[in-house]
Image (cartoon, rainbow, N blue to C red):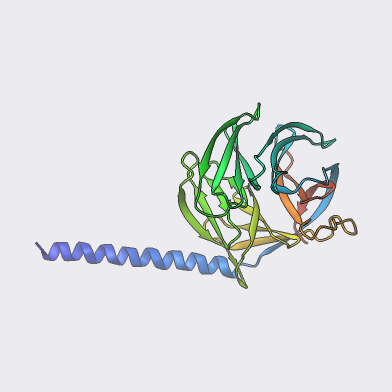
Amino acid sequence: MGSSAQRLVRRSGLAAAVVTSVIAAGAWLMARTTPETIWRYEIVGEYPHDPNAFTQGLYFEGGHLFEGTGRRGESAVRKLELDTGRVVEQADLQPWFFGEGIAPWGDRIYQLTWVAGVGFIYDKESFEPEGQFQYDTEGWGLTHDERSFIMSDGSADLSFRHPVSFRELRRLPVSDEMGPVVALNELEYVDGYIWANIWHRDELVAIDPETGVVVGRLDLSDLMAGARPADPEGVLNGIAHDPSTGHFFVTGKLWSRVFEIRLTEPN
């Protein structure tokens, strides 16, 4: 029964929705016009890295690096001694799987695979298998914000996923002043921002997790200068963060070094 009061409520609700949309659009436009921070860095440490490791995922916890590697027949999850690069623990994937990004959740490690649509779960201490999970896209990079996993699939979108079911909760299109930022790869969530490798580019970008706007960049083209792998796929890939120092650990596929860097803003 359509009374005047009901029509007024409907109109009020519509007006509120319009106002909310305008506010959201205004916030997005403000973010789009905010200049990107161009970060600089200094190297504060260098560590050995297995030059045969096709690095796909990296994180730092408890004084150790955890690394996921790729390529069929070579894919694994490993716990590494930072100073020596020695493998402390390792779990190998079956040879038909191509390993991708990794991320911790509680006392487990989650690992993506590239095109198989299945990921694997390991006990963080023993590296024994704990289960599997599924998804309907390619698997590239993985991190989390303590509420949900954040996953890349090589496109310009990131997906936020439930930490138990791994179902998609929302998608985040990523863009900069030139448009969509494609080939988002390895990810690390740090201090409210998503840091990402872009495949075959020697830089990291910092992404606002609410708007998807790139708010900062870090050029790492000088790392490994003159000592890059001959393999054309031996590109920058791997971001880990040490919250106790604020430093980042970065490496690449088939690189012989892991670099510990401290970020600085330009004057």
Question: Which quarter of the rendering shows the N terminus?
Answer: bottom left
| The C terminus sits in image quarter | bottom right
Residue at x 52% of width, y 56% of height = 210
Q: Quadrant of residue 131?
A: top right
- Visible residue check, residue 147: no
**Left-right relation of 148 to 109:** left
User: Residue 114: x and y, percent?
Assistant: 61, 51
Residue 84 appears in the figure: yes
In-image side of 59 versus 82 (left or right): left
Q: In this view, does 194 lie to the left or right of 173?
A: right
Q: Which of 195 and 162 is in front in this view?
A: 162
- Which residue is located at x 58 percent, y 62 percent? 155
Res. 246 image quadrant: top right
Residue 145 in the figure: left or right of residue 262: left
Q: Please count the marks in the image.
A: 0
Q: In the image, what residue occupies the spot 57% across and 68% down?
A: 32
Query: Where is residue 53 shown, x and y percent of the image?
Result: 77, 45
